[in-house]
Image: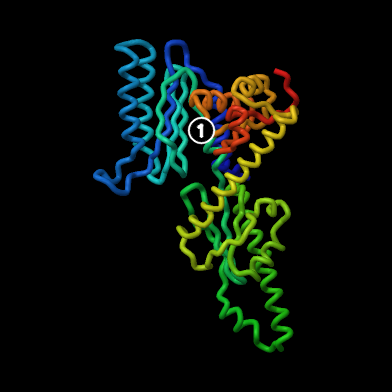
């Protein structure tokens, strides 16, 4: 029996926890780089990546700030060389890259993502982890099943990437020719209904296997109404909680890019709704004086005590260093980070807070 590779989300969460434990040795620093690795499609230099330009500029600035000699300069130069070598070997399909490096401490972690990061390169005592935590919060893997009564097409959507995987297909004309021989209309209809149920059951098994293999947190089903009704009945109970609510109009012959656009819009809206709901819960807990704290100092104290379960951060919260500090503390203590945008209640409590595991008096 072989062990399956962990899902992308699991790999990302494990990387976040590992990096959060690091601190640069005295006199050195940790390089944290987030890069938009998408090639430009237009402009004077098509194909050039904005992340590559930003990285070169920041490397020059950081090196100039470290003086002419010393352990920090030696460590940084070694880090820069290793980063350049790693980027030269990247999968060309990568949209975003995050790198954390400190040769003096033996740290080197690289993450390739199916969506771009905001360009940021920092050399500091601690790793900058907010962007990675935000990406983990907002990122979902979705399986899309487009079905009619005799065809199932399956897609996996991750960020800006989509791929189609083998589904199930039967030729309806051949099926009809096989099935009508010697049957009256009543028997034929019964046979068709039984065939459709069996097809839906087989399709549900394929969907379940794909969701488990890909670590999908969301399942989108679309297509013929009769087929979808049977498919929803056949899905195992543990999958029903992942099924997206609402109607999705995707033709059985739709191209992959159309499927991605439909699902991307839904996932973005779903994530926004969930983050708003989490912020609502936090504000309620703060105002009731129960399992919630607001403001930077109390949130930091709750994290340091291990009392924070979910840290809620306004994406516009400043200073940026404080966001990174909270993300690092959250990763160290197993707290989840939820990023929210434009929530008036959260901003009234300082733009940051934590839902607690237990009452905390600190």
Q: Residue at x 38, y 18 (%)?
A: 75
Q: Residue at x 61, y 33 (%)?
A: 346
Vertically, is 23 above or below 161?
above
Scheme of colours in the image:
rainbow
Q: Nearer the viewer, residue 233 or 180?
A: 233
Quadrant location of the N terminus in the rendered image:
top right
Q: Secondary structure at mark 1?
A: loop
Q: Residue at x 43, y 18 (%)?
A: 29
Vertically, is 292 above or below 2?
above
- The percent position of residue 137, horizontal first and vertical second, equals 57, 38
Q: Quadrant of residue 244?
A: bottom right
Q: Nearer the viewer, residue 55 or 350?
A: 350
Which residue is under mark 1? Answer: 316
- The percent position of residue 275, horizontal first and vertical second, equals 61, 40
- The percent position of residue 46, horizontal first and vertical second, equals 28, 46
Q: Residue furthest left?
A: 44
Quadrant location of the C terminus in the rendered image:
top right
- The percent position of residue 324, horizontal first and vertical second, equals 52, 26
Indicate left or right for 316 with 176 as reference. left
Indicate left or right for 342 with 286 as reference. left
């Amino acid at each position: 029996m072989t062990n399956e590779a962990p899902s992308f989300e699991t790999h990302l969460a494990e990387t976040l926890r590992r990096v959060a434990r690091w601190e640069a040795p005295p006199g050195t620093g940790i390089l944290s780089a987030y890069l938009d690795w998408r090639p430009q499609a237009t402009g004077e230099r098509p194909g050039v990546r904005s992340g590559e330009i930003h990285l070169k500029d920041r490397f020059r600035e950081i090196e100039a700030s470290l003086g002419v000699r010393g352990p920090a300069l030696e460590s940084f130069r070694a880090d820069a060389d290793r980063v350049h070598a790693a980027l030269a070997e990247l999968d060309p399909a990568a949209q975003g890259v995050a790198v954390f490096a400190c040769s003096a401490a033996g740290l080197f972690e690289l993450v390739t993502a199916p969506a771009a990061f905001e360009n940021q390169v920092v050399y500091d005592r601690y790793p900058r982890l907010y962007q990675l935590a935000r990406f983990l919060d907002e990122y979902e893997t979705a399986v899309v099943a487009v079905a009619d009564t005799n065809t199932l097409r399956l897609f996996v959507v991750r960020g800006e990437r989509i791929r189609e995987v083998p589904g199930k297909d039967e030729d309806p004309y051949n099926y009809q020719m096989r099935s009508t021989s010697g049957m009256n209309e009543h028997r034929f209809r019964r046979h068709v209904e039984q065939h459709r149920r069996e097809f839906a059951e087989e399709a549900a098994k394929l969907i379940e296997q794909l969701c488990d293999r890909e670590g999908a947190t969301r399942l989108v089903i679309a297509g013929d109404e009769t087929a979808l009704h049977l498919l929803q009945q056949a899905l195992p109970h543990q999958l029903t909680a992942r099924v997206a609510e609402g109607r999705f109009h995707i033709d059985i012959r739709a191209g992959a890019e159309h499927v991605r656009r439909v699902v991307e819009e839904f996932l973005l809206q779903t994530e926004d709704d969930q983050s708003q709901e989490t912020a609502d819960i936090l504000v309620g807990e703060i105002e009731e004086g129960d399992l919630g704290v607001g403001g930077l100092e109390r949130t930091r104290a709750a994290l340091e005590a291990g009392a924070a379960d979910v840290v809620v951060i306004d994406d516009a919260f400043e200073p940026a260093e404080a966001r990174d500090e909270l993300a690092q503390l959250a990763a160290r203590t197993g707290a989840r980070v939820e990023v929210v945008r434009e929530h008036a209640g959260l901003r009234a409590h300082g733009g940051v807070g934590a839902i607690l595991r237990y009452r905390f008096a600190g």
